[in-house]
Image (cartoon, grey):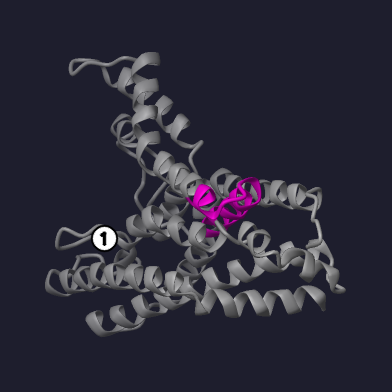
């Protein structure tokens, strides 16, 4: 009951904040434009295989714009960080924490209500964007998706929610570690830039040092180089999300890289059932859930042990 009060209060505050509305509509406009152009491209140049054509709206870019999947993996973390970077330290700055906790509200109900409200806000925002994509696809293609496509779209929604939830938990963690909201925001943006930009360069450098290759290197050496690079990249939540959603939105995906596919040219390309696709990326799914749980768990422990002084 106490957590429910905190949840609805935080949910109202989050939906009423101008920064969330601005960033949400920015993501919606750019992603909607990318999906609309992808739909027009599919309408003008119909693919030979029309199965799972709705899923291509999420993975196919057009008109110089990236796909919605790429856009969400890159800019989606900003939405989670935006909701969490001042969730706790702003309350301490205003001196409202001691007043709230003086009421019959436990600490765990307060921090859990904040996290669940942020997660619900992200869920509603992501669901709204996916439904708009569904409507644009219905308008551009002229026919509805089948049951298999709807199941994969719902699975993609759950994966996206876990991914955004990790960045929300990270923002709340920095909000507890840093007393100033500006410091926690800069820390969150720094981590976002590291995992979305610099980590790819770092993975390439590590692979070059451990398995150097040249243009005339045999395919086996290129395969080892790419395997090391992929292993390093899997320490990034961005890579885990991209690999997991790629298997969900591309039914023919079997987890093979380019070099491995060249070494194994006889791999079948028939679409896999959703259960088989999830089995391929089960480690990525578990890793994403574990990262989110660990990040929020650390925030929970730190907040429960933090001293709150009455003003």
Q: Is residue 309 left or right of residue 130?
A: right
Magenta-span inclusion, residue 57:
no
Camera-side residue: 21 or 201? 21
The answer to which of 70 and 93 lies nearer the viewer is 93
Disc 1 residue crowd, few under 14, some 14–19, many 20+, Cα 10 Å: many
Relative to 252, say whether 37 is above or below.
below
For the question of whether residue 212 can be seen, the reply is: yes
Magenta-tinted stretch: 163-185
Q: Is residue 148 visible?
A: no
Residue extending farthest to the left is 44
Estimate the x, y position of residue 78 in percent, counting from the top left.
43, 57
Q: Image point 61% across, 53% down: which residue?
A: 175
Residue 128, position in %: x, y?
Answer: 44, 78
Rendering coords of residue 300 (x, y %)? 74, 52
Vertical relation: 89 (above or below) 206: below
Can you say which quadrant of the picture contains the N terminus? bottom right
The residue labelled by disc 1 is 60
User: The C terminus appears in which quarter of the rendering?
Assistant: bottom right
Q: Secondary structure at mark 1?
A: loop
């Amino acid at each position: 009951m106490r957590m429910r009060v905190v949840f609805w209060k935080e949910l109202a505050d989050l939906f009423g904040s101008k920064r969330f509305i601005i960033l949400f509509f920015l993501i919606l406009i750019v992603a909607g434009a990318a999906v609309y152009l992808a739909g027009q491209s599919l309408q003008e140049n119909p693919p030979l295989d029309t199965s799972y054509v709705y899923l291509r709206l999420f993975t196919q870019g057009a008109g110089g714009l990236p796909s919605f999947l790429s856009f969400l993996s890159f800019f989606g973390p900003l939405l989670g960080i935006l909701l969490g970077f001042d969730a706790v330290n702003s309350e301490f700055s205003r001196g409202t924490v001691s007043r709230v906790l003086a009421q019959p509200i436990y600490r765990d109900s307060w921090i859990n209500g904040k996290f669940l409200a942020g997660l619900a806000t992200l869920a509603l925002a992501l669901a709204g964007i996916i439904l708009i994509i569904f409507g644009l696809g219905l308008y551009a293609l002229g026919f509805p998706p089948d049951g298999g496509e709807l199941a994969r779209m719902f699975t993609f929604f759950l994966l996206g929610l876990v991914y955004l939830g990790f960045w929300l938990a990270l923002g709340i963690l920095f909000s507890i570690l840093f007393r100033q909201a500006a410091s926690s925001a800069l820390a969150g943006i720094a981590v976002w830039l590291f995992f979305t930009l610099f980590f790819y360069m770092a993975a390439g450098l590590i692979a070059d040092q451990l398995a150097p290759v040249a243009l005339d290197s045999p395919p086996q050496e290129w395969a080892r180089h790419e395997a090391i690079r992929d292993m390093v990249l899997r320490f990034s939540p961005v890579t885990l999300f991209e690999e997991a959603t790629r298997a969900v939105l591309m039914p023919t995906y079997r987890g093979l890289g380019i070099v491995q596919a060249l070494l194994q040219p006889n791999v079948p390309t028939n679409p896999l059932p959703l259960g088989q696709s999830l089995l391929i990326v089960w480690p990525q799914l578990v890793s994403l859930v574990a990262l989110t749980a660990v990040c929020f768990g650390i925030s929970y422990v730190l907040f429960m042990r933090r001293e709150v002084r009455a003003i």
